[in-house]
Amino acid sequence: MSSLLADAAIVQKMASEPWPDDVCLYQPYKSNEVGTADSVQQVLLPDNAQCLAVQCYLQMCGLPFRTVLRTNAEHMSPSGKPPFLRAGPYVISEVDPIIKFVSTKGHSLSDKLDRPQQAEMKAYLALVQGTLGNAELYISWCDPTTASEISRPRYSSPYPWPLNTLLAYRKQWDVQNQLKALGWYSKTLEEVYDEVDNCCKALAQRLGNHHYFFKQGPTELDALVFGHLYTILTTPLTDNSLADIVKEYSNLINFCRHIEKKFFEERERGPKD
Amino acid sequence: MAAPMELWCWKGDWGLPSIDVDCLTVIAYAKFAGAPLKLKKINNPWKSPSGSLPVFKNGEDLVFTSPGRILDYLRQEKFNADYELTAKQSSDVVAFTSLLEEKFIPAMLHSFWMDARNYVDFSRPWYARALPFPLNFFVPGRMQQAAEGRLQYTRGGDHLIDGEMESQIYRDAKECLNLLSGRLGEQDFFFGQSPTTLDAIVFAHIAPVLKAPLPSNQLQNHLKNCNNLVNFCARVTSRYFPSDSEDADHSTFTPSTVDDRQYSTTNKILSAGVAIAAMVAYALLSGLVQIDMSGDDDVPAVPESDINVENFRFQEEEQEDD
């Protein structure tokens, strides 16, 4: 999809159209979603982080959208990864392309940053996606207990036998291959926790006691960090080690509370603005 | 601390102490921090416990293979290049390291290993020459497979059309270079006057791309346009690796001389050996030299001297099958 975005003619055409009214964000079912059967508890830690980051980013931009839950969101997505956005004739999946797409519509949160700050923001985005993203994948699919007790049952819950077993193992196989290629698969759980701790430490030091990472206001970095940290804090796993690492950093917890309050609770209270 | 700290690494070329990103990171950091490091350019990844270089050794017990661990150890041993950094700056180091890892490394792997021309004319012959005898035949191929696997699993996918992955990773890498160039600005090093971990890491990533004489190199062309990064590389090489940059003038490797030099004596002897072995094997299997063998184990057959040669051979084979 991002190759389409690179095409100047298409970008211009997209930019000339305003933000459509019927934008839908497709993502897998969550456990505590209102109006869904309790039996559908599908979304996993890594996917949920990405979905929440996109939701948060769109909220920050003040763009109206509707969240649509689909059990097969992963397979509907053009890149095979949830969430994806349907805006008029365009279907865009994953965080980075969605942010690029939104900016072609004239909504960008990072324009106000100067050049070194943009470089910093991109660097921290890479850090969060690279470290927290891979750590979430590792814990969900490479830790045998989590994989067998949480990830495979949840991932396969919408499908009948024998498809559920096959798809869950295929997914696990794919994720493991991806982490092998990146050198993460050979790490131990302890080493992964260390990586997460290093990442959180860097984020906490960068954030300080501010509300946002940059003094100019919220950016996509805030959205992505919120997506990952909030998911890590609120997702029950076989043990709490991962959440405990994040809880060591009180300013990150405050940061999550603040974003949740500002962009999620206020929206729920009042009608869509 | 009695035994000197040793680093087993890939050898250098084109004025760099090593051509491998991870090795170069450690070497540059050690130089910046003033750590005495004895380099052993063994060029043999099989001697490493993890199967890849670098290997850091301090005495017999302390062995590290990941550059991150090596740098941590050097810091513990008070060889610290980051004394002057604030907490926030240290975080920036971590973040920019991930940026290079996520955005730059894929394009680097692609241009060294996946680009067909670069692989055939440059990477494979370079590593084949550097590696010791039996390994040079298959280690370059394995390195290519590892690079291909990494790109396929992390950046590829069925949803991409042909060439889309390639254009995406190069676009990312170029953006990454622009960001680094913007971050460096007019400073000598990323955090002012003295080099830090980040300078070591950035240098290790961009210097091989800048110096390697790859036949087709869009990444290098883009890098050459970022003047401050080029100057930064020149500054690091001239200040910290003056001896290596002198060697660059009589560099041992340029793609044009690959063919003359690579097929040296060992390979000549080996190819002659393989050819002879193949001919002998063919001769034996097709029965051309059967008469030699028949003398030993089949003496009773000899008296029937008027027997047709064809039949004789046929019987011979049957007996052998039993």
Image (cartoon, coloured by chain):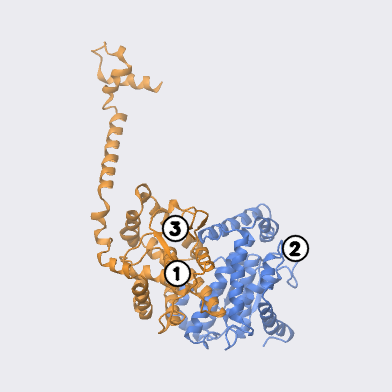
Chain colours: A blue, B orange
Q: Between residue B150 and residue B60, name the one nearer to us.
A: B60
Q: Between residue A87 and residue B198, name the one nearer to us.
A: B198
Q: Which mark is residue A39?
A: 2
- For mark 3, name the chain: B
Q: SS of the residue at dot 2?
A: loop
Instruction: Where is residue B165? Give x, y as percent.
Output: 45, 67
* Residue, disc 1: B29
Q: Between residue B29 and residue A106, name the one nearer to us.
A: B29
Instruction: Where is residue B193? Give x, y as percent.
Output: 43, 81
- Residue at image x 33%, y 69%? B211
Place residue A160 in its image quadrant. Answer: bottom right
Amino acid residing under circle 1: Tyr
Instruction: Where is residue A94? Give x, y as percent.
Output: 56, 72
Label 3: few (<14), some or many (≥20) within 10 Å?
Answer: many
Q: Quadrant of the C terminus of chain B?
A: top left
Q: CA distance from mark 3 to mark 2?
A: 50 Å
Label 2: few (<14), some or many (≥20) within 10 Å?
Answer: few
Q: Which mark is residue B53?
A: 3
Q: SS of the residue at dot 3?
A: loop
- For mark 1, name the chain: B
The image shows residue B190, relative to residue B144, as above or below, that is below
Q: CA distance from mark 3 to mark 1?
A: 16 Å
Left/right placement of residue A27 relative to residue B101 reads right
Instruction: Where is residue A141? Give x, y as percent.
Output: 62, 59
Amino acid residing under circle 2: Ser
Residue at the far front in the pictured view:
B2
